């Protein structure tokens, strides 16, 4: 225990350890990854004050070009410390090496470069207008930072999703208080080291560790000097945050849960649809907000599709990050309990278990981890809880359909509205169906493909607002109109 590192808070350019710790546990074998210094209310107060002062200091006076050059240096330092970031993300999440090396960490760095470039390209708009005296007026629209932004992020793609908020917030000139998930404090702590190393002015990036209710998360959201809250996580957490943010009328940007549909038509390229659905159901052990938990397959190919998906799911290799495994563990034993409770409920609700449904036994230290088998169900009814509640594990239900209108109705018949995937070779039909999806993003013949310039987010319980490209910069900015009479 004494050898495990201590992850500290980073406030006003100083690493702070207040002596009050919680444990960061490996989901691979239950071992201790680190002890984490939990920020109390007074540390959160200090972080907010530091951020406020930064806005009034050197950072607030920097030109866009200087600011963006600083963000490029952050990206370069993440790239220089690539292996440290990979190790920290793997220690916290147990994800496969390949995923962390190819997606999580590169995207973490890329977010800073992308938003630096985008901010450099922005100009000021202006409109000339006529006036009765014939002299006219000019309206100039400025973009000003909102001020102090609270960033609260989840554990499933820790660095990627946190920097997806931090990078545009800083590019737009704000100062941030960041709280990573209590499950994944590692890469956020490294990011604080990066900020320190590149000479980010103190108070611009503050890191506080802790939990939600009664802890750092709630202290941030309720703080009177926090000007906006950007959050990714569960829908019910979004509700709690929104209530707490209501008192100060703080703007919120929410990326929340999903219960996403995949629709496979009989004219789909069968092999692509099967391997695409394997990815969309089981990537990151099913812990991606965009994962397909409801798969609808046209009746003529239903049996063949279920058998093919079963075969591929059973061939997925579960194991340690260095094993080149297809699937690592869930994030924690606690989360596995939640997923297993749905496995039990599904049977009570009449599911036929096509494959999976249990915990694998390895006969080694992985039995202390949070592994679970990929699981496929058929036979549930539309109103089953397992068809309506987000499970967030490696599990999908497959249901047959007969008509296009029927499957559109089923796909949309949910409280969530994040993503959908359509598999067909008939592109006219693909476009017709995609246009009717009540989601923020609909893929045709693919899944998870992202152009960072496009709006990303959800409708209904899946979120408020959009992130990506200019949509992010708009959330983190306040327009100011200057109307000048000639
Ligand atoms: P979560 O809501 O449990 O926690 C997310 C963060 O919120 C954590 O940092 C947590 O400490 C904090 N938090 C919890 N309660 C809080 C409160 N009352 N006030 C302030 N902060 C609070 O989510 P999670 O389990 O970490 O992540 C999984 C969820 O995130 C899933 O529902 C998933 O769909 C969703 N998600 C959505 C997107 C998206 O882009 N839409 C992306 C990734 C994950």
Image (cartoon, helix red, strand yellow):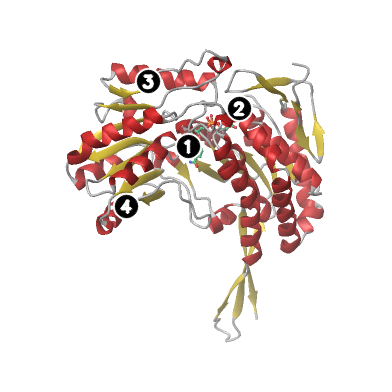
Snapshot quadrant of residue 413: top left
Which quarter of the rendered picture does the N terminus lie within?
top right
Please tell me the numbered disc located at residue 255. none
Task: Give the labeled residue for mark 1.
Answer: 288
The kind of secondary structure element at disc 2 is loop
First in residue order: circle 1 vs circle 3: 1
Nearer to me, 127 or 216: 216
Whether ligand 1 has any atom under 8 Å from the Cβ at mark 2 is answered as yes
Task: Give the labeled residue for mark 4.
Answer: 434
Which quarter of the rendered picture does the C terminus lie within?
bottom right
The mark closer to the camera, 1 or 3, is 3
Please tell me the numbered disc located at residue 183. 2
The kind of secondary structure element at disc 4 is helix
| Cα–Cα span, label 3 and label 2 | 24 Å
Nearer to me, 97 or 466: 97
Whether ligand 1 has any atom under 8 Å from the Cβ at mark 3 is answered as no
| Cα–Cα span, label 4 and label 3 | 32 Å
Q: Position of residue 339 (x, y in %)?
A: 43, 22
Whether ligand 1 has any atom under 8 Å from the Cβ at mark 4 is answered as no
First in residue order: circle 4 vs circle 3: 3
First in residue order: circle 4 vs circle 2: 2
Tell me: residue 119, above or below residue 168. Answer: below
Nearer to me, 230 or 408: 408
């Amino acid at each position: 225990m004494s050898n495990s590192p201590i992850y500290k808070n980073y406030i006003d350019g100083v690493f702070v350890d207040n002596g009050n710790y919680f444990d960061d546990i490996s989901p691979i074998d239950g071992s201790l990854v680190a002890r984490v210094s939990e920020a109390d209310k007074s540390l959160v107060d200090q972080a907010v004050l530091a951020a406020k002062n930064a806005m009034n200091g050197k950072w607030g006076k920097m030109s866009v070009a200087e600011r963006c050059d600083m963000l490029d240096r952050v990206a370069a330092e993440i790239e220089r410390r690539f292996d440290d970031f990979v190790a920290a993300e793997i220690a916290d999440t147990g994800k496969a090496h390949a995923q962390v090396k190819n997606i999580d960490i590169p995207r973490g760095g890329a977010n800073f470069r992308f938003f630096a470039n985008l901010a450099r390209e922005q100009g000021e708009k202006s409109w000339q207008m006529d006036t009765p005296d014939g002299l006219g007026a000019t309206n100039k629209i400025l973009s000003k930072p909102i001020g102090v932004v609270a960033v609260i992020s989840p554990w499933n793609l820790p660095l990627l999703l946190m920097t997806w908020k931090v990078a545009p917030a800083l590019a737009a000139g704000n100062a941030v208080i960041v709280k990573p998930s209590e499950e994944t404090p590692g890469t956020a702590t490294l990011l604080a080291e990066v900020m320190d190393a590149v000479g980010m002015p103190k108070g611009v990036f503050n890191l506080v560790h802790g939990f939600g209710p009664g802890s750092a998360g709630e202290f941030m959201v309720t703080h009177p000097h926090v000007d906006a809250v950007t959050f990714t996580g569960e829908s019910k957490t979004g509700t709690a945050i929104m209530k707490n943010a209501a008192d100060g009328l703080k703007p919120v940007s929410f990326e929340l849960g999903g219960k996403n549909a995949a629709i496979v038509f009989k004219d789909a390229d069968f092999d692509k649809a099967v391997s695409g659905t394997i990815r969309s159901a089981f990537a990151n052990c099913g812990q991606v907000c965009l994962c397909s938990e409801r798969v609808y397959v046209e009746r003529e190919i239903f049996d063949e599709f279920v058998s093919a998906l079963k075969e591929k799911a059973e061939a997925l290799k579960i194991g340690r990050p260095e094993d080149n495994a297809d699937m690592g563990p869930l994030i924690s034993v606690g989360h596995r309990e939640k997923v297993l409770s749905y496995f039990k409920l599904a049977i009570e609700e009449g599911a036929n278990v096509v494959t999976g449904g249990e915990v694998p036994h390895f006969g080694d230290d992985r039995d202390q981890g949070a592994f679970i088998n990929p699981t496929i169900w058929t036979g549930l009814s539309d109103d089953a809880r397992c068809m309506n509640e987000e499970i967030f594990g490696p599990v999908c239900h497959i249901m047959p359909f007969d008509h296009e209108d029927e499957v559109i109705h089923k796909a949309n018949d949910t409280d969530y509205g994040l993503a959908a995937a359509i598999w067909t070779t008939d592109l006219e039909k693909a476009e017709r169906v995609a246009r009717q999806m009540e989601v923020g993003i609909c893929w045709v013949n693919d899944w998870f493909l992202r152009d960072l310039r496009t709006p990303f987010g959800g409708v209904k319980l899946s979120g408020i607002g959009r992130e990506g490209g200019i949509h992010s910069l708009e959330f983190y900015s306040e327009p100011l109109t200057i109307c000048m009479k000639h």
